[in-house]
Image: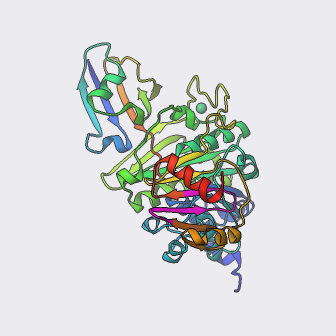
């Protein structure tokens, strides 16, 4: 299945803004993070189709996955 | 010094149709707390003071250092040389910019103990902090008391901001649920561009002006991120509460009750802050006592003591920032040795 990944803020740097990726059905968000070498402890929130999703959520065909870091500097 | 009439100062802003005479009067009657006056806090405080927000309370626990000057636009070299507390330096600069605004400085760490007295009498809270421990505390307080607040942060070339309107939008704990081992990139590892700070601070300030002039309906209900270098701008919906949100749904205000709050915290890349109990310290007396043990300087607001590779900055409320170590044990032992346990 194909999913559309959108990275936000610092997660884009050295990676990409938006990318279509291929995964077997049943893939969870945490697997995508692992492939992108994004440390789970840096995650602010994940969205599937612009709704909050926990990292153990399964993705569906055509899902739009958004990953946003905790940005803290001030 | 002559005080300029507010008509002269605000004439161009009053001409702006979103503000007008009525909006300007509302700003003059407003009370805003700014928690943290580093990079984002400096921008926000500066814009709100010049816009004529009648009362500003600047809360900051830190002092000015040379590495701040690249982006913390309220401070100058003299402030850094004299390690003036940021809240004090900011209040002085802001009052000089606009004497129609009352600026109160609070050299303090926002804690569950003082949050009520520092924030309850303000109609809006602006986030200028650099850490989530303080943001979750602001969030718990704001949701519990129904006071809007605006989250603002910057790192590298990126800024992020979100309006938290209790009962109308997501809260900070909806967007970023607390995680026990929550890590994040810091300006020490990622660096920081002053333009990223200025841009996002300006966005947050205009949201504040909308709220204070009664244009709440125009406020952004998204999480906004902007990158001023590798150009990007995105907004994510922030209207919906998270179904099981600890703070705004379950109303468990764990940060307000101070559960598990450490009294010792790493701050920056090479410092430890110790504030285990509030005590009043006579800086002049301490200066005399420390003289035989190292180099001591006092600026009236804080005392600085150099001992070997360590630098202790001590505040009148008993708080100390120990630079030169990230070892909590070393910091605690220095504190105990020179200030008493
Ligand atoms: Zn919430």
| Rendered location of residue B102, percent (x, y) | 72, 68
Residue bounds of the magenta highlight: B307-321
Quarter of the figure with the N terminus of chain B:
bottom right
The residue located at (71%, 79%) in the rendering is B5
Asked whether residue B267 is in view, the answer is: yes
| Rendered location of residue B121, percent (x, y) | 76, 52
Q: Is residue A19 above or below residue B105?
A: above
Coloured how? rainbow
Examine the image and state in which quarter residue B8 appears: bottom right
Ligand 1 shown in quarter: top right
Q: Is residue B128 above or below residue A24?
A: below
Asked whether residue B101 is in view, the answer is: no
| Rendered location of residue B329, percent (x, y) | 52, 46
The residue located at (64%, 31%) in the rendering is B248
Q: In the image shown, does B125 or B284 lie closer to the viewer? A: B284
Answer left or right for A71 relative to B100: left
Q: Is residue B311 magenta?
A: yes
The residue located at (43%, 46%) in the rendering is B225
* The furthest residue to the top: A26
| Rendered location of residue B23, percent (x, y) | 69, 60
Q: In the image shown, does A68 or B287 lie closer to the viewer? A: B287
Q: Is residue B24 above or below residue B36?
A: below
The tally of labels here is: 0
* The furthest residue to the left: A22
The residue located at (52%, 71%) in the rendering is B75
Q: In the image shown, does B239 or B247 lie closer to the viewer? A: B247
Q: Is residue B284 magenta?
A: no
* The furthest residue to the front: B292
């Amino acid at each position: 299945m194909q999913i559309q990944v959108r990275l936000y803020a610092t997660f884009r740097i050295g990676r990409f803004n938006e990318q279509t990726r291929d995964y077997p059905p049943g893939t969870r968000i945490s697997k995508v993070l692992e492939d992108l070498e994004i440390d789970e402890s840096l995650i602010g929130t994940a969205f599937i189709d612009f709704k909050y999703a926990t990292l153990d959520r399964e993705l569906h065909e055509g899902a739009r996955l958004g990953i946003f870091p905790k940005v803290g500097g001030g | 010094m002559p005080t300029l009439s507010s008509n002269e100062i605000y004439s161009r802003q009053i001409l702006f149709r979103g503000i007008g005479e009525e909006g300007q009067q509302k700003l003059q009657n407003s009370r805003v707390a700014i928690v943290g006056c580093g990079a984002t806090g400096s921008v926000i405080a500066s814009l709100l003071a010049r816009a004529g927000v009648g009362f500003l309370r600047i809360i900051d626990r830190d002092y000015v250092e040379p590495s701040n000057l690249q982006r913390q636009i309220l401070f100058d070299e003299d402030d850094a040389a004299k390690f003036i507390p940021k809240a004090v330096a900011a209040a002085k600069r802001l009052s000089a910019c606009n004497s129609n605004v009352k600026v109160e400085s609070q050299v303090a760490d926002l804690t569950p103990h003082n949050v009520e007295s520092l924030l309850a009498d303000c109609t809006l809270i602006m986030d200028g902090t650099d850490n989530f421990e303080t943001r979750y505390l602001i969030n718990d307080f704001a949701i519990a008391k129904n006071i809007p607040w605006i989250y603002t942060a910057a790192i590298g070339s990126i800024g992020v901001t979100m309006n938290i309107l209790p009962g109308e939008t997501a809260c900070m704990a909806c967007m970023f649920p607390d995680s026990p081992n929550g890590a994040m990139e810091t300006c020490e590892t990622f660096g920081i561009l002053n333009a990223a700070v200025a841009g996002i601070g300006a966005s947050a300030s205009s949201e504040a002006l909308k709220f204070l002039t009664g244009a709440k309906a125009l406020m952004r209900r998204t999480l906004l991120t902007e990158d001023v270098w590798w150009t990007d701008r995105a907004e994510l919906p922030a209207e919906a509460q998270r179904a099981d949100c600890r703070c705004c749904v379950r109303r468990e205000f764990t940060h307000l009750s101070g559960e598990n709050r450490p009294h010792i915290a790493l701050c920056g890349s090479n410092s430890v802050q110790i504030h285990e109990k509030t005590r009043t310290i006579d800086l002049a007396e301490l200066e005399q006592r420390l003289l035989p043990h190292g180099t001591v300087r006092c600026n009236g607001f804080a005392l600085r003591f150099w001992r070997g590779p360590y630098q202790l900055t001590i505040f009148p409320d008993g708080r100390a920032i120990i630079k030169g170590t990230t070892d909590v044990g070393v910091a605690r032992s220095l504190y105990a040795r020179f200030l008493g346990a």
